Image (tube, rainbow, N blue to C red):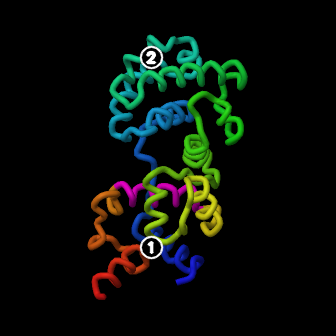
Amino acid sequence: MRTKERFAQVMAWFEKNMPIAESELNFSNEYELLVAVMLSAQCTDKRVNQVTPALFKAYPNIETLADSTVENVLPFIRSVSYPNSKAEHLVAMAKRVVEVYKGVIPNTREELQTLAGVGRKTANVVLAVWWNQPTMAVDTHIFRVAERIGLTKNAKNPLDSEQQLIKYIPEHIIPKAHHWLLLHGRYTCQARKPQCKKCGLSTICRDFSIKRKHTLA
């Protein structure tokens, strides 16, 4: 199957079977989204959603977070992964947003990546989720799923995977495609025990096709 055809079939399947695909993080504005995404690095959305209510109650906006200290923020996020570095990043991020961007969360990848703790993946998530920009944030789930299905081929790293994906996914569905692939990897195409027998993409999946050939051989 040609790459373009595979992409078309995969996107069509998701559109039909997962018409609503959204972030599982809880947030109500771009400030809360940015904080939640920063906290979610190497941590589950479920855990992040457990700590953000108290955090946002204490720091309801970027200005209050900027006025805080690492020592004061740390107790609110102690249960997430790497709490010390994340507390430092959150406070430093908030201070820069207030001082440089007048309290407004930037809406370009270049500007977002000038903030402490914000890399390309985090920036892409915020841009896609809040501003619906055609940015593909590649995490471990998406990197794995895209390679297994055959949307990417021998991707060397997340950036390589991202570039291969956006080449064939129409711009207007890239934000949703991010969630499609992520959620599929989180609940179906899991790392250790992929649910191939329950997967509606098995007839299109390159990895499943290879496994089946080996079984029949």
- Secondary structure, mark 2, is helix
Q: What is the number of callouts on the image?
A: 2
What amino acid is found at the position of numbered circle 1 in the picture? Trp
Tell me where residue 110 appears, x and y as whole percent: 71, 39
Magenta highlight: main SS: helix
The earlier-in-sequence mark between 2 and 1 is 1
The circle on residue 73 is: 2
Q: Residue at horizontal 61%, vertical 43%?
A: 120
In magenta stretch: residue 55: no
- Secondary structure, mark 1, is helix
Tell me where residue 54 appears, x and y as whole percent: 37, 22
- Quadrant including the C terminus: bottom left
Q: Residues within 10 Å of mark 2 (few under 14, many from 20)?
A: many
Residue where numbered disc 1 is placed: 13
Q: Is residue 168 left or right of residue 199?
A: right
Q: Residue at horizontal 53%, vertical 24%?
A: 90
- The residues bearing labels 2 and 1 have C-alpha atoms spaced at a distance of 43 Å
Q: Which residues, given as a range, are shown in magenta?
A: 173-186
Q: Quadrant of residue 210?
A: bottom left
Q: Quadrant of residue 121?
A: top right
